[in-house]
């Protein structure tokens, strides 16, 4: 998959094969974009796994994990709500964890991390909103 400008077909293929989304940087504050996106993805039938080092029990009714490495079971998609400077570390953790795909939200770009994901055979999408793309492609 190309690093930039994936086709609608490529995005659809990733989303159709996604059941579980680990949301790195998920905030417990309803006013934050990560919260709104995750809540809507839950409503659309995805299992959300909050990943944040902030100590708390649950977000959106789901158990919180401090790192991707601590999440049990398979992760279909890692959705990243962290600054571009921090994205590379999260991408490396997603690669090590065996995630099937990685999604960097709007304004999050890390070319070197994308190259590492591609080298590992993991599709990566950068600088796009998961909620917007899903809504555009599926939620008519």
Image (cartoon, grey):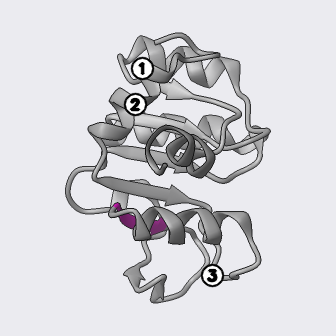
Q: Quadrant of the N terminus?
A: top left
Nearest to the observer: residue 89 or residue 35: 35
Boundaries of the magenta span: 46-50
- Residues at circles 3 and 2 in contact by the CB criterion of under 8 Å: no
Label disc, if present, on residue 12 of the rendered structure? 2
Image coordinates for residue 87, horizontal then vertical, percent: 66, 40
Q: Along the horizontal axis of the image, is 114 left or right of 69?
A: right
Q: Residue at x 52, y 67 (%)?
A: 40
| Crowd rating for badge 3 (residues with CA inside 10 Å; few <14, some 14–19, many 20+) | some
Q: Which residue is mark 3?
A: 28
- Front label number (3 vs 2): 2
Q: Residue furthest front?
A: 140
The numbered mark, 3 or 2, whose residue comes first in the sequence reads 2
Q: CA distance from mark 3 to mark 2?
A: 28 Å
Q: Is residue 87 magenta?
A: no
Number of marks present in the image shown: 3
Q: Which residue is mark 1?
A: 9
């Amino acid at each position: 998959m190309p690093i930039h400008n994936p086709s609608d077909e490529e995005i659809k293929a990733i989303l159709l094969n996604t059941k579980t989304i680990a949301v790195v940087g998920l905030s417990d504050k309803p006013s934050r974009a990560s919260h709104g996106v995750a809540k809507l993805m839950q409503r659309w039938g995805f299992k959300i796994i909050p990943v944040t080092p902030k100590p708390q029990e649950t977000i959106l009714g789901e158990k919180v994990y401090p790192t991707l490495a601590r999440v049990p079971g398979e992760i279909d998609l890692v959705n990243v709500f962290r600054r571009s400077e921090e994205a590379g570390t999260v991408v490396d953790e997603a690669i090590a964890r065996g995630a099937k795909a990685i999604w960097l939200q709007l304004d999050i770009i890390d070319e070197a991390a994308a190259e590492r994901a591609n080298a590992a055979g993991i599709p990566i999408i950068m600088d796009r909103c998961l909620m917007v793309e899903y809504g555009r492609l599926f939620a008519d």
